[in-house]
Image (tube, rainbow, N blue to C red):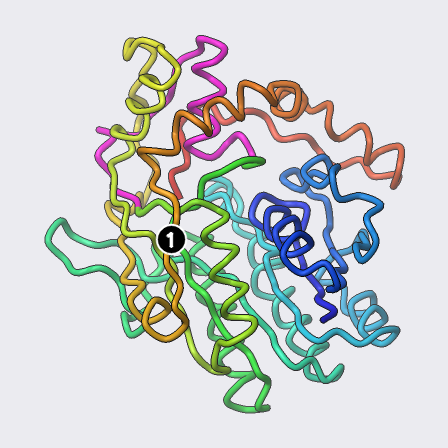
Amino acid sequence: MHILVTGGAGFIGSNFIRYILTAHRDWLITNLDKLTYAGNLENLADVEGRPGYTFVLGDIADRAQVGELLGKQHFDAIINFAAESHVDRSILDASPFIDTNVCGTQVLLEAARAGGVSRFIQVSTDEVYGSLGPGDPPFTEESPLAPNSPYAASKAAADLLVRAYHRTYGLPAIITRCSNNYGPYQFPEKLIPLMITNALENKPLPVYGDGLNIRDWIHVEDHCRAIELVLLNGRPGEVYNIGAGCELTNLDVVRAILRALGRPESLITYVPDRPGHDRRYAIDASKIRNTLGWVPRYKLQEHLPELACWYQEHSAWWQRIKAGEYRRYYDVQYGQRAKASPQQEKGSDSA
């Protein structure tokens, strides 16, 4: 199988590429990534040069480049991880989210239709469903879309385009909607890596509001295995929710990190809440469990000490990111001058 993975230099995409190249050694993967601030080829340093893996620098919203890529070779499947994904950034400026998440998805859909791609998987998010109250049942695939941030709205719009291309053109497309991921190589402005790395440096751990916002956490490898099952056995036109049923408040997660690292709770610093902050997410993943036989293997509370050790052992990786030094490779290799991301200090993105 030859797969085009978009956004493969990001957190989930890079973990998926590594997983697939290990699980299916005869598969081919082309990784198309724009290498914006969150794209980091160091995430894939261990697979660079491996037979069957190719990296292409490019933008999914570049119609000419995407068309040329799919015109030169046939792909059995496209898995679209490429997205602007940081909620805080979407509040400051929504335009990049529309460009990549909406327009870029439409470019990919049109190219997939023209290129005869036999499977298109749109990797989406539970944030498209909006927010739940304390006693509300978890989101199902039938829950109405009610996004509350520009980021979530852009992903919901992309999902609707995917649905429309399936219904109108018969494109064999599938949507997956996953809960909050955690694991290695996560960009350190997200909640868990930010808290771990700040704690390792004995810096304040900024927590939005009262810290009682609830998220449903899933290990990135469990997510990757779910996408693999959808790729192989999922039904076109369907939506599959992916979640591990691990609901925790942000404060619970932060305190668990401090315990794992032996750091004091005095490092916790409460900061003003962000606008429109969703209170609770929870996923009902019974559909993918019952129809495809997927079962998560990791539990956050049990895995946090191991994950904290990973970030300790890979301190050079995240320190280069926080300092912006990881961009120098791209500037030399590709002539880019993308801005490095400043560390998120005002609050932690739990989405």
Q: Position of residue 145 (x, y in %)?
A: 33, 68
> In the image shown, does 25 or 105 lie closer to the viewer?
25
Q: Position of residue 206 (x, y in %)?
A: 37, 22
Left or right placement of residue 335 versus residue 216 in this view = right
Mark 1 closeness class: few <14, some 14–19, many ≥20 residues within 10 Å: some
> In the image shown, does 156 or 193 lie closer to the viewer?
193
Residue type indicated by callout 1: Pro
Q: Is residue 235 above or below residue 201?
A: below
**Quadrant of the image for the C terminus?**
top left
> In the image shown, does 221 or 347 lie closer to the viewer?
221
* Residue at 31% over, 30% down: 253
Residue 161 visible somewhere in the drawing: no
Secondary element at tag 1: loop
| Residue 154 counted in the magenta span | no
Q: Where on the picture, by quarter, is residue 346?
A: top left
Left or right placement of residue 166 versus residue 40 in this view = left
| Residue 213 counted in the magenta span | yes
Residue 246 visible somewhere in the drawing: yes
Q: How many marks?
A: 1
* Residue at 47% over, 54% down: 223
Q: Is residue 88 above or below residue 322?
A: below
Q: Where on the picture, by quarter, is residue 285?
A: bottom left
Q: Is residue 337 above or below residue 138?
A: above
Q: Position of residue 97 (x, y in %)?
A: 56, 54
* Residue at 40% over, 63% down: 294
Left or right placement of residue 227 versus residue 100 in this view = left
**Quadrant of the image for the N terminus?**
bottom right
Q: Position of residue 49 (x, y in %)?
A: 85, 45
Q: Residue furthest left?
A: 135
Q: Is residue 80 above or below residue 68?
A: above
Which residue, given by chain and number where applicable, does mark 1 sit on?
Answer: 296
Q: Which residues are magenta?
A: 187-215
